[in-house]
Image (cartoon, rainbow, N blue to C red):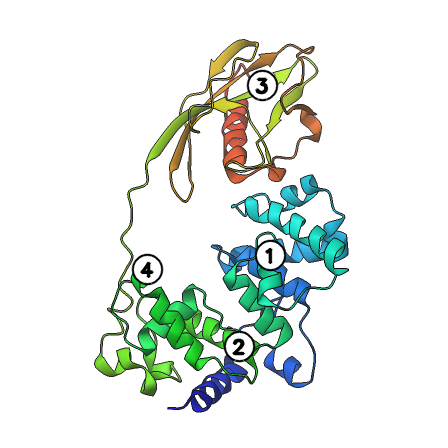
Amino acid sequence: MSQEQFSTLLLGWYDQNAREMPWRWSPQDITRGIKPDPYKVWLSEVMLQQTMVKVVIPYYLKFVNRWPDIYSLAHADLDDILKEWAGLGYYSRARNLHSCAKKIVDCYGGSFPNTDKELRSLPGIGTYIASAIRAIAFCQPATVIDGNIERVITRLFAIQSPQAQAKKLIRKQAEKLTPTTRPGDYAQALMDLGATLCRPRSPLCFKCPLRLCCQAFQKGVQDEIPQPRKRNHIPTRSGTMLVVLNQNNCLLVERRPEGGLLGGTMGWPGYGWEPNKDKQSLPIENPVAIPGHVQHTFSHFQAQIKVQIGQIDVEYCLSDGYKLIPLDAFDPQSMPTLMRKVYEHVQSYWSQNSLAKK
């Protein structure tokens, strides 16, 4: 089957089955000459990195409602961006989002560049996002490969090597298939095919428009390809977090280092669960260790956190990134998921224990 025949078959399926998403322009929109907004393409692709579509949608809608274009995002306060990002994880994406927006406004007058070299020079934009922007926003024949597309290509050509070892071959085969006509729709069609039919397990081959040219299907090995990745053991890190109030009923929080885990976000002081972080000696009065612990899984380790509560002197010097927030003005939703879990653990204790906060 020729490249043209292949893309025609795939695009015919996509025209009837394209998923509706708030950041996507339908095949009918593209046919009518409506051009995708590079800002929204970029924003969605950054959010979708290692994150499921259903999780991203509400975050994306909040972002475009608050910052509808590159200029508003570039001039936003990073703290506000991090608050809106809270719970989405991988916080370096949010910091890079802000840096990238500022650079596009300062260096490109607010217009996205459309070359691979220029796009990949921007913060947070690598090969995949650069290709997605070029294909979807600028209708360039760029080869886009995400996890779904990688799986589709692996099955189409019955590539039986583990995916980590077969990436060069997968890209080579994908490049051969990339069309010059409707490259953005083509890339999104492959994504949709992988997400809805060519699933990791139990692929729906009987519904697939490509089954007659799929080597894995023809050989009956579609359930064996791609080979599953070996899962590494995730270690557990134990530590302590401190949730303390002063006499004025203000919570003590700290800004985390920009370059570290949960970088730049506000969190609870603590120690033990992060490498190279010494025990913090805060002048806490009558510290109480709450029974139980809080558990949270990151990509490369599991945190198991004991929580202490207590009071801190109202005159405590707020140095090293510490900040006091009045309890009645505190919004736990502005914090990363782990920090929210810790606060919920404390709230549960306060509500059940006679020594609750006053």
Task: Sort mark 2 into few (<14), some (14-19) or many (20+) by Cα contacts within 10 Å.
Answer: some
For disc 2, the marked residue is 18
Q: Earlier in the sequence, mark 2 or mark 4?
A: 2
Q: Is mark 2 on a helix, strand or loop?
A: loop
- Which of pointers 2 and 3 lies earlier in the amino acid sequence? 2
**Helix, strand or loop status at disc 1:** loop
Q: Find the distance from the CA under tag 3 to the CA under tag 4.
A: 46 Å
Label of residue 164 in the image: 4
Q: Any mark on residue 189, and which? A: none
Distance from the alpha carbon under mark 2 to that under mark 3: 51 Å
194 up-or-down from 52: above or below: below
Is 117 rendered above or below residue 210?
above
Q: In the rendered image, which residue does mark 1 sit on?
A: 121
The outermost residue toward the front is 117
Disc 3 marks which residue? 244
Q: Residue at x 66, y 80 (%)?
A: 29
Q: How crowded is mark 4: few (under 14 residues within 10 Å), some or many (20 or more)?
A: few
Circle 1: is it few (<14), some (14-19), or many (20+) Cα within 10 Å? few
